[in-house]
Image: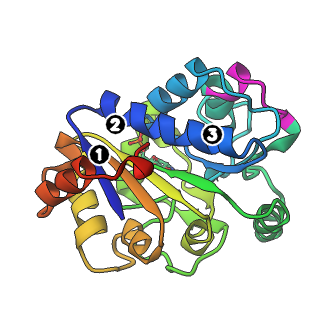
Amino acid sequence: MEIIIQPTAEAATKIAARLMARTIREKPAAVLGLATGGTMEPLYRELVAMKLDWSKLTTFNLDEYIGISPMHPQSYHSFMCEKLFSKVNINIGNVHIPDGLAKDVPAACAHYEEKISAAGGIDLQLLGIGTDGHIGFNEPTSSLASRTRIKTLTPQTRKDNARYFERAGEVPFHVITMGIGTILESRHCALLAFGKNKARAMAEAVEGPITSMNPASALQLHPKVTVFLDEEAAVELKMKDYYRWVFEQKPDWQKV
Ligand code: GLP
C-alpha cells in the first residue's frame, strides 16, 4: 500500500484528483469504480473543475440502498447525478449503479458482476471507509471473497449515514454492495479517509491484521492501493513518519 499523508483533506483530495485525471487521460475508455459519501464530494468538485473528457468512460458504483427509488434525494443514484454525472460529458448509458428496487436482488447482483466483467474489469476503484472499516457497504464480518450482494447495515452505519436523511428512521436497513472480492479484482484502488473519526479504522486497515472485522484490511492483499489521508485520519498510524519519508523520496517517474 502507498500511504499519502497530507496536512489537510483539501491537499490530499487534490492529489487523488490528479491520480484520477491521469488515469482518464492515459486511458480515455477506462472503467472507473465510483464511491459516494461526504469524502467524495470535494473530489468530484475537483474532477469537474478539471474539465476532463468523460465521453468514453464507463463507471460502476460500489453500492446503493435497497428500497428507495433512484429519484429519492438520498439514493446513491441521486448523489452521483447531482455531484458528478450532471456536470461532466459522460454517456449516461455507460453509467452503472446497483438497482435498489430490483425485484430479484440476487439476479440483479449477479448481472452487475457480469457487466463489470464484460466491461473488462475496473481500472481504478475509488473507496471511502466507514468508521467501522467498511468499504462499499461491506460491513465487518463480510467475507473477504464476497461478490456483489445484499448486506444489512450495522446500527453504527445507519447512525453515521442518518445525517443525510430527514429522519434517522428513514435510513434503509439493506443495501446492495460490490463484494470485497469484487473490489480486490480492480486493477488499482484509491482509498480516501479524512478526519479523526476515521483514524482507528485506518490504523487497523493499514497496520492491523487482515480480518473481516475490518473489511478495508483486505486491501493489504491487493498489489496496487493508494491511500490518501489527512493528518487527523493518520494520527493512529505507527509508521506514519515512514510513509511521509517514502512520499518525499519518490522517484520522479512515480510522482502523481
Ligand atoms: C457510506 C458508503 C461508503 C463510504 C462511507 C463513508 O457508508 N457506502 O462507500 O465510504 O459511507 O462516508 P463518508 O465519506 O461520508 O464518511
Q: Is residue 21 placed above or below 23 in the rendered structure?
A: above
Quarter that holds the C terminus: top left
Q: Residue 3 colored magenta?
A: no
Q: Which residues are magenta?
A: 84-92
| Residue for badge 2 | 12
Q: Residue at x 62, y 53 (%)?
A: 63
The circle on residue 229 is 1
Confirm or reject: label 1 Cβ below 8 Å from ligand 1. Answer: no
Confirm or reject: label 3 Cβ below 8 Å from ligand 1. Answer: yes
Q: Verify CB contact (< 8 Å) between mark 1 and mark 2.
A: yes
Q: Residue at x 78, y 31 (%)?
A: 90
Nearer-N-terminus badge (2/3): 2
Q: Residue at x 75, y 41 (%)?
A: 28
The circle on residue 76 is 3
Q: CA distance from mark 1 to mark 2?
A: 6 Å
Dot 3 alpha-carbon crowd within 10 angstroms: few under 14, some 14 to 19, many 20 or more: many
Residue 110 locus on image (x, y percent): 79, 71
Q: Is residue 29 placed above or below 144 in the rendered structure?
A: above
Nearer-N-terminus badge (1/3): 3
